[in-house]
Amino acid sequence: MKVTALEEYGLRCMILLARNAGVESLTLPEISAKEGLSLPYAGKLLMILKQSGLVKAVRGRRGGYTLAKPPEQIVLREVFNALGEPVFGPNHCERYTENGECCVHNEDCTVRTVWGTFNRFVSGYLDSVTLADLVKGNGNSGKSELPSQVDQSN
Amino acid sequence: MKVTALEEYGLRCMILLARNAGVESLTLPEISAKEGLSLPYAGKLLMILKQSGLVKAVRGRRGGYTLAKPPEQIVLREVFNALGEPVFGPNHCERYTENGECCVHNEDCTVRTVWGTFNRFVSGYLDSVTLADLVKGNGNSGKSELPSQVDQSN
DNA sequence: ATTATACTTTACTAATTTGTAATGATTTCG
DNA sequence: CGAAATCATTACAAATTAGTAAAGTATAAT
């Protein structure tokens, strides 16, 4: 279970834009410098975010990127959906297929149940945190409560 | 955020073994056939699981694989830790580094906070589900409750 | 108009992950 | 024994993801 590079860096860019929301737009060179990304890579990221409708871009002199909505209205799940597939998405079974059609567990797929439940669990968290929450510094706010026994080890 | 192939197929193998726990051991050819995996790939998977102490292997005629512990005592998180890194593990910052040392957000890393919280949230779920739960058919049991508003869309 | 600024697109290279192939080592049965 | 069954190891090929390079298009200030 891995966070992809697109998700990691894309989220960073969104947080950066959220910090400047309402104040000013940020240019690609600015974003790339502040996040330590190469300019073309930052461009690629912002392009993805733009095509998903999460940011707006203005070209030419005085141009730059801004969030398409106020940070209070952008939830983590939107950001991740823009940058990659959910843990258990519609393509999951298709992806992990071995024998042509679906996986060998057509009738009674325990694994699929695990992922489905897990995905809903995760989505509950991702839906409860906005970019504004993150900028304010409480990434663990939101409506969902953490499980009571929290284990830091991995 | 992606489930890796190792995690997907490794979990399938563990569930398969859990179904036969206490009854009989399964050979590599059996596992590979039942899961639709190539024999060498199944071997690779079981090797990883064995090296993590989750399964035991017996060589030679009459050999095969069995779970190292009863399914009631194997929790999903153990399985995933064996097959890959957690969402936010010790190598996370090292991995997504651009400028030599750690990431550019050394002092005030919002992203790190997100992943940390998220990881604890996820771990809470993974710790609450055993292989026995899955075999019994309730992958959503356990101590953790699902968030109240469950959204199936992605 | 011209030019500097800034976003956009396409093509390509490199790294990682997935999966395969082939060969070696160990146990048990006859 | 020795041969069949079975796990173990190493090296390699293919696919995906990550990241770079370079040339193109639009805007606004001068």
Image (cartoon, coloured by chain):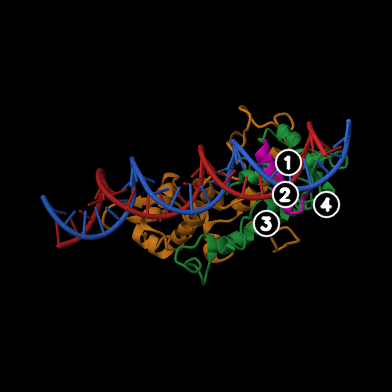
Chain colours: A green, B orange, C red, D blue
Check disc 1 and give the amino acid type. Answer: Cys
Badge number at residue A73: 4
Q: Which residues are magenta?
A: A39-57
Discs 1 and 4 lie in a common subunit? yes
Are discs 1 and 2 located on one and the same chain? yes
> What residue is shown with label 3?
A121
Q: Describe residue A133's horizontal placement relative to residue B152 as left or right.
A: right
Whichever of callouts 4 and 2 sits on the residue coming sooner in the sequence is 2
Chain hosting mark 2: A
The local crowd at label 3, few if under 14, some if 14 to 19, many if 20 or more residues have their Cα within 10 Å, is: many
Which amino acid type corresponds to the residue marked 2 in the rendered image?
Leu
- Read off the residue under disc 1: A13
Asked if the stretch drawn in magenta spans residue A56, the answer is yes
Of badges 1 and 3, the one in the foreground is 1
Q: Residues within 10 Å of mark 1 (few under 14, many from 20)?
A: many
Contact (CB < 8 A) between labels 1 and 2?
yes
- Does residue A94 appear to the left or right of B62 in the view shown? right
